[in-house]
């Protein structure tokens, strides 16, 4: 598929039942990541700038944004 864009590849892969099922299963994670990344980007903030008032690190924000972190409400 030389010359294909990532969007083209994704559309093709969605025709595969296993890929589509796995992609659909991640819908909630994609929504959470988008809900975090979009406002931060619109505000022009870095992950580090978001982390500071939350008393956490940039690494934690990165993990949350890519779905690898588990949020905690502990202070």
Image (tube, rainbow, N blue to C red):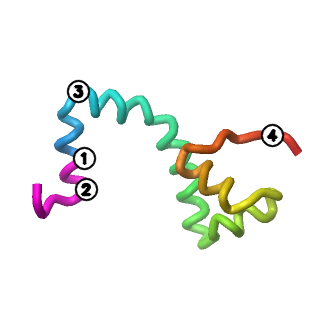
Q: Are marks 2 and 4 in contact (CB under 8 Å)?
A: no
Quick check: marks 2 and 1 in contact, CB under 8 Å?
yes
Labels 3 and 4: the sequence-earlier one: 3
Q: CA distance from mark 4 to mark 1?
A: 36 Å
Q: Earlier in the sequence, mark 2 or mark 4?
A: 2
Q: Position of residue 16 (x, y in %)?
A: 20, 32
Q: Which residue is mark 3?
A: 17
Q: Are marks 1 and 3 in contact (CB under 8 Å)?
A: no
Dot 3 and dot 2 residues touching (CB under 8 Å): no
Mark 3–mark 4 CB contact (< 8 Å):
no
Q: Residues within 10 Å of mark 3 (few under 14, many from 20)?
A: few
Eyeballing the image, is 11 above or below 38? above
- Mark 4 highlights which residue? 73
Residues rendered magenta in the picture = 1-10
Left or right: residue 38 compared with residue 54? left
Q: CA distance from mark 3 to mark 4?
A: 37 Å
Q: Position of residue 62 (x, y in %)?
A: 60, 56
Residue 23 location, quadrant: top left
**What quarter of the picture does the N terminus occupy?**
bottom left
Considering the numbered disc 1 on the image, is that residue within a helix, a strand or a loop? helix
If the image is split into quadrants, where does the C terminus sit?
A: top right
Q: Secondary structure at mark 3?
A: helix
The alpha-carbon separation of the residues under discs 2 and 1 comes to 6 Å
Q: Earlier in the sequence, mark 1 or mark 3?
A: 1
Pointer 2: what residue?
Answer: 6
Q: Which residue is mark 1?
A: 10
**Which residue shows up at 55% across the image and 57% down it?**
37
Earlier residue among tags 4 and 1: 1
């Amino acid at each position: 598929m030389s010359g294909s864009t990532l969007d083209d590849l994704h559309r093709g892969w969605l025709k595969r039942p296993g890929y589509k099922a796995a992609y659909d299963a991640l819908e909630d994670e994609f929504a959470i990541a988008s809900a975090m990344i979009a406002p931060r980007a619109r505000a022009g903030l870095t992950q580090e700038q978001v982390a500071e008032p939350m008393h956490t690190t940039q690494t934690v924000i990165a993990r949350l944004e890519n779905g690898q972190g588990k949020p905690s409400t502990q202070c």
